[in-house]
Amino acid sequence: MVDVAQRVKDISYMLGKEATPNGQAYNWLGVMRDGTKISLYYNINRSEEDLGFIEAMDPHKKLGLSTDGWHVVLFPIMDIPKYFVRYGV
């Protein structure tokens, strides 16, 4: 069973920012290495196999990943350090 509270803490640690609760989800404003700010979203009501992924709103495709029609990309939580810098909480 996935510990979603621990996942939220892990994401916050990787970004160096506290999570902002948003109903049944959490949000962060991630900062990429080039300074671009991208909104990140983690829905805790996903199926268990999808709880290892986080969503990002990326209309300009700065992450270099395929987006859906709403400019949203889904990628593994463990890839956060690959795209975002960590700031002190």
Image (cartoon, helix red, strand yellow):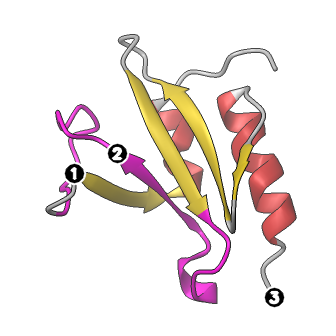
Nearest to the eye among marks 3 and 1: give it.
Answer: 1
Residue under the image location 28 percent in, 41 percent down: 58
Is 46 inside the magenta-drawn segment? yes
| Amino acid on which the number 1 mark rests in the picture | His
Secondary element at tag 3: loop
Left or right: residue 52 versus residue 3 is left
The rendered magenta stretch, by its main secondary structure, is classed as: loop
Answer with the quarter of the image where residue 7 lies.
bottom right
Q: Are marks 3 and 1 in contact (CB under 8 Å)?
A: no
Secondary element at tag 2: strand
| Amino acid on which the number 3 mark rests in the picture | Met
Query: Which label was assigned to residue 35?
Result: none
Which one is in front, 7 or 42?
A: 42
How would you rate the neighbour count of disc 3 (Cα within 10 Å): few for under 14, some for 14-19, many for 20 or more?
few
How would you rate the neighbour count of disc 2 (Cα within 10 Å): few for under 14, some for 14-19, many for 20 or more?
some
Residue 31 drawn above or below residue 55: above
Q: Please state, as top left, top right, bottom left or bottom right, where the C terminus lies in the image.
A: top right
Answer with the quarter of the image where residue 46 lies.
bottom right
Nearest to the eye among marks 3 and 2: give it.
Answer: 2
Left or right: residue 47 versus residue 35 is right
- The residue to which callout 1 is attached is 71
* First in residue order: circle 3 vs circle 2: 3
Secondary element at tag 1: loop
Left or right: residue 87 versus residue 43 is right
Residue under the image location 85 percent in, 63 percent down: 5
Q: Which residues are magenta?
A: 43-68
- The residue to which callout 2 is attached is 57
Q: Are marks 2 and 1 in contact (CB under 8 Å)?
A: yes
Give the CA separation, mark 2 to mark 1: 6 Å
Which one is in front, 24 or 88?
A: 24
- The residue to which callout 3 is attached is 1
